[in-house]
Image (cartoon, rainbow, N blue to C red):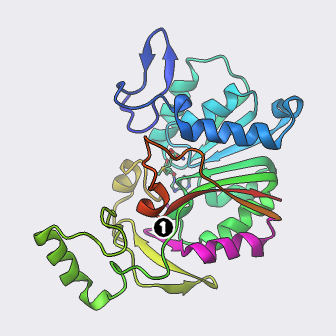
Amino acid sequence: MNFIAHNVDLGNGKFTLPDTFPVLESTERWKSIERTIKLMFRPEEIPTLRVVDLGCLEGGYSLAFAKLGMQVTGMDAREDNIEKCEWVKSHFDLPNLSYVKDDVKNLANYEQFDVIFCAGLLYHLDEPSSFIKLMHDQTRRMTIIHTHYSLERDSFYDNQRLSFVQRAVKKVFNLPNNHYPQKYDYRLSEVVEHEGYKGRWFHEFSADSSKKAIEKNAEASYSNYKSFWHTKPEILRCFREVGYRMIFEQYDFIGKYTGWDYTEKHDRGMFVLMR
Ligand SMILES: C[S@@+](CC[C@H](N)C(=O)[O-])C[C@H]1O[C@@H](n2cnc3c(N)ncnc32)[C@H](O)[C@@H]1O
């Protein structure tokens, strides 16, 4: 099996990826999530908690939640991803771990979960505001969202008529972005309003891409060819307006490995929301 993202220790010295990839459970990101779970829930209730890992990819986070003792469902739309998840699972004796192949947009078809874990997924959706509302409605206690957002003013994307020229000049002369020198070009649109919130469109793939090509692109969106990235003030407003009572941003996974400038460089954050 060809893994690309989650390095899992399968036991007997076997791993899903070479040691250039940190083992997922030893990463600061996982440890920070584990700290949050242990802070918010009593030890005796952890084994009773139902958690769903949305867009679970190769299942590494689902497995880590299951090892904590939680009742876990990993959900992903791609057949190949679910196959890898099941293969990883077969190395462990964890009856509290299961996977479903489904579009996360069907979340309303499932019973409520105590915890919803939504990492690297929200920025792959075309109606993220409705989806945040859906997650709120399907969460009994806590939602963790690790996502990109966009900036209200971003020198790199703002002048759309010049952006082609700006990009060409930037490339030829290897110029830094004004906003953040080493920023990756996500090819975002100008700021527009969508579902009542401001943000920028992110182009995922062309509208006429074949089903096969979409299936193959393991980490991309699945049922929409462009995705919407709220600006940061607007994503916070959305969290509040759908009804989350407490909204935290978590930073303790940031460090030497991610770079201390992680949020500025990637316009990305980890939000912990309580109902
Ligand atoms: C960037 S990866 C994030 C993986 C993982 N959650 C993590 O943080 O490492 C996005 C994942 O979401 C899945 N995905 C994207 N759109 C989806 C949809 N509409 N329904 C279900 N899964 C989706 C992809 O197949 C992929 O596994």
Q: Where is residue 262 in the image (x, y as percent from the top left)?
A: 46, 55
In the rendered image, which residue does mark 1 sit on? 224
Location of residue 16 with respect to 141 vertically, above or below: above
The span picked out in magenta is 222-244
Q: Where is residue 29 in the image (x, y as percent from the top left)?
A: 56, 41
Numbered-mark total: 1
Q: Please identify the quarter of the rendering in which residue 104 is found.
A: bottom right
**Circle 1 Cα neighbour tier, 10 Å, few/some/many (<14 / 14–19 / ≥20):** some
Three-letter residue code for mark 1: Asn
User: Is the C-beta of the residue carrying label 1 under 8 Å from the nearest atom of ligand 1?
Assistant: yes
As drawn, which residue projects farthest toward the top? 12
Let me know if residue 59 appears in the view: no
Q: Where is residue 12 in the image (x, y as percent from the top left)?
A: 48, 8
Q: Does residue 229 show up magenta in the picture?
A: yes
Which residue is found at the position 76% from the left and 34% from the top?
A: 71
Q: Where is residue 18 in the image (x, y as percent from the top left)?
A: 35, 25
- Near-viewer residue (37 or 98): 37
Q: Does residue 90 show up magenta in the picture?
A: no
- Near-viewer residue (262 or 49): 262
Location of residue 28 with respect to 174 vertically, above or below: above
